Image: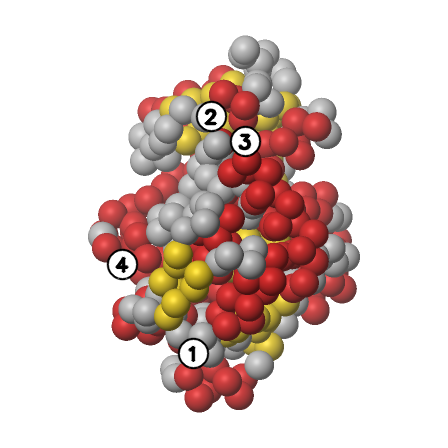
């Protein structure tokens, strides 16, 4: 199906990934027209909910121009990225995708906003990887880290995302110093720093917080799991439905209520050991062992054990529905069980 140029659409890049899965369903259920861009064709069930689907890379400038000229894009959810472990395998490629790809999208969105005489909302999932705590001891004693502290990432992914947060702020507030000249910006950039995400529908790939979802998906399939970080490793997490809700809530928030361009969000902080115990609680046949990988452990050790998301709660009412136990018992256990039952 194609759209008329006059129809306002929401563009999702990286739509076939973890967050895209939930987001497409929620946006199309709300009656929004969704246009997707992903390296791979969407799964048929996912494609049903979209108005137009493009297959290709965000580094293809001609393709991006075609998408933005074929539709009146009102909002962009820019999900396409190489995550932290993948990015360390090929840092130069990660930089191209994560930085040059984001810059190209920001520019297309800005031009599109100018062409159509409106402001395009640009939603950008950032990450706890933008933090770089200097040691485990500092991590332990720092507790809930606020947005403006410890932003010295040690991974290419973290550097890329932190820089793109700044690029977004530049485009939204300072592009060619338009604000000083009294011009209305064509782009409204809003970022969320996600913690580790736990999804029942997809198995993550290429991230370093992936141990938690991996142990659950392995347990549901009756497979043993060797965890690549040690049991006393703490990170903030949230369930995927809360992550999708957060993106949609932030998109809808009135600009006047926002005091930042990028917000921390999180539902709970948990150790790998607590995740393993809870996995065993909901899947009693789970077999989890510990086999820390020095590089991946090193990455997680620089990320905060928890984040201060009070700005998101105050400015736009962020309030996750799933705490630690609910995430495992009410969301993951039934949904992951159903996922693998469907496949057998
Ligand atoms: N999930 C991301 C990663 O592990 C961090 O936000 O790379």
* Residue 100 falls left or right of residue 188: left
Which residue appears at 76% of the width and 64% of the height? 314
Q: Earlier in the sequence, mark 3 or mark 2?
A: 2
Do the residues under discs 2 and 1 have CB atoms within 8 angstroms?
Answer: no
User: Which of the two discs, 2 and 1, sits closer to the camera?
Assistant: 2
Q: Earlier in the sequence, mark 4 or mark 3?
A: 4
Disc 4 under 8 Å from ligand 1? The reply is no
- Up/down of 179 relative to 343, above or below: below
Nearer the viewer's eye, disc 3 or disc 2? 3
Look at the numbered disc 1 and give the secondary structure of its residue. loop
**Residue found farthest to the front:** 285
Q: In whole angstroms, how far apart are the C-alphas of marks 1 and 3?
A: 42 Å
Q: Quadrant of residue 146?
A: bottom right
Spatial CA distance of label 4 from label 3 is 35 Å
Q: Which residue is mark 1?
A: 133
Figure colour scheme: secondary structure
Secondary structure state at the residue bearing disc 3: helix
Residue wearing tag 3: 342
How many angstroms separate mark 4 from mark 1 (CA)? 18 Å
* Residue 41 sits in quarter: top left
Q: Say which of marks 2 and 4 sits in front.
A: 2
Residue at the image point whose x is 39% and y is 58% from the top:
225
In this figure, which residue is indicated by the disc labeled 4?
A: 88
Circle 2 sits on which residue?
43
Residue 296 in picture, x, y percent from top left: 33, 67
Give the mark nearest the N terminus, 4 or 1. 4
Dot 1 and dot 3 residues touching (CB under 8 Å): no
Q: Nearer the viewer, residue 65 or 291?
A: 291
């Amino acid at each position: 199906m194609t759209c008329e140029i006059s129809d306002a659409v929401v563009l999702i890049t990286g739509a076939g990934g973890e967050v895209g899965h939930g987001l497409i369903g929620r946006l199309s259920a709300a009656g929004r027209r969704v246009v997707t861009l992903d390296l791979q064709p969407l799964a048929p069930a996912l494609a049903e909910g979209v108005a137009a689907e493009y297959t290709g890379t965000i580094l293809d400038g001609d393709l991006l121009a075609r998408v933005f000229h074929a539709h009146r894009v009102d909002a962009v959810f820019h999900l396409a990225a190489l995550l932290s472990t993948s990015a360390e395998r090929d840092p130069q490629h990660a930089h191209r995708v994560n930085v040059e790809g984001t810059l190209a999208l920001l520019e297309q969105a800005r031009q599109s906003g100018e062409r159509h005489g409106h402001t395009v909302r640009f939603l950008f999932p950032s990450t706890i990887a933008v933090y770089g705590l200097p040691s485990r001891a500092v991590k332990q004693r720092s507790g809930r880290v606020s947005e403006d502290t410890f932003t010295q990432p040690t991974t290419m992914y973290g550097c890329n995302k932190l820089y793109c947060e700044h690029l977004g702020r530049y485009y939204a507030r300072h592009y060619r110093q338009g604000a000083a000249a009294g011009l209305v910006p064509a782009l409204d950039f809003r970022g969320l720093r996600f913690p580790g995400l736990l999804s029942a529908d997809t198995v993550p790939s290429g991230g370093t917080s992936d141990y938690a979802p991996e142990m659950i998906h392995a347990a549901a399939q009756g497979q043993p799991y060797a965890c690549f970080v040690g049991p006393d490793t703490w990170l903030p997490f949230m369930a995927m439905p809360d992550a999708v809700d957060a993106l949609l809530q932030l998109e809808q928030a009135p600009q006047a209520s926002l005091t930042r361009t990028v917000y921390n969000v999180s539902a709970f902080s948990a150790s790998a050991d607590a995740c393993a115990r809870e996995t065993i609680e909901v899947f009693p046949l789970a077999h989890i062992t510990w086999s820390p990988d020095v590089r991946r452990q090193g990455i997680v050790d620089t990320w905060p054990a928890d984040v201060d998301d009070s700005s998101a709660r105050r400015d736009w009412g962020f309030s996750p529905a799933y705490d630690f136990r609910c995430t495992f018992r009410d969301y993951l256990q039934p949904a992951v069980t159903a996922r693998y039952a469907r496949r057998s």
